[in-house]
Image (cartoon, rainbow, N blue to C red):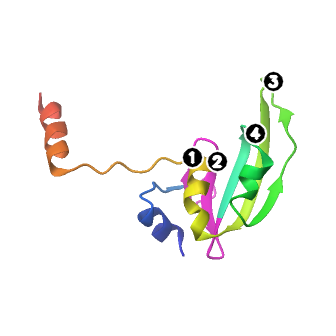
Amino acid sequence: MTIEQFAEQFRLRMVRDECGDKIIPGKRGHLYCAGGELCLMVVDGAPANRSRWEALGGKLWLGDISPNSAGRRVQDVKIEGIPIENALAAIQMARCRQKRILSAEEREECLARLRK
């Protein structure tokens, strides 16, 4: 599965990172595809229990929990090869937001408010 197919299936927004690779950003980390596998990376994110990361499946690497420059506890996490069955859990752990889909009535209401 490609990142475009994954983003379309789960209604997620895709952007390019500083290297030009396509990623799905989240508040805690980001999702990406490497070799057709779903991966999650968190850099300086809020710590979570190890069991929550292990529940996603795949190959897990956990960095140590240490304070950042502001004194807040942070942790690095990388998970490769997340099974598609655990995709929703990965989206929640990375805290990615889904695109909002408006009905025809909601869209008309929004456009009417813009015209005012």
Task: Judge depth for marks 4 and 1 and give the one in front.
Answer: 4
Q: Position of residue 105 (x, y in %)?
A: 14, 45
Can residue 111 be seen here? The reply is yes
Q: Is residue 55 left or right of residue 63?
A: left
Q: Which residue is mark 4?
A: 47
Q: Residue at image x 58%, y 68%?
A: 85
Residue bounds of the magenta highlight: 17-38
Whole-angstrom CA distance, mark 4 to mark 1, is: 15 Å
**At label 3, which amino acid type do we have?**
Gly
Task: Judge depth for marks 4 and 3 and give the one in front.
Answer: 4
User: Which element carries disc 1, helix, strand or loop?
Assistant: loop
Residue 16 is drawn in which quadrant? bottom right
**At label 1, which amino acid type do we have?**
Gly
**At label 4, which amino acid type do we have?**
Pro
- The numbered disc on residue 26 is 1
Is tag 4's residue or tag 3's residue first in the polypeptide sequence? 4
Who is closer to the viewer here, 105 or 2? 105
Who is closer to the viewer here, 16 or 92? 92
Q: Residues within 10 Å of mark 2 (few under 14, many from 20)?
A: many
Q: Are marks 4 and 2 in contact (CB under 8 Å)?
A: no
> Magenta stretch: residue 33 in it?
yes
Q: Are marks 2 and 1 in contact (CB under 8 Å)?
A: yes
Whole-angstrom CA distance, mark 4 to mark 2, is: 12 Å
Q: Is residue 76 left or right of residue 104?
A: right
Q: Residue at image x 19%, y 43%?
A: 106
> Magenta stretch: residue 55 in it?
no
Q: Which residue is mark 3?
A: 71
Residue 33 is drawn in which quadrant? bottom right
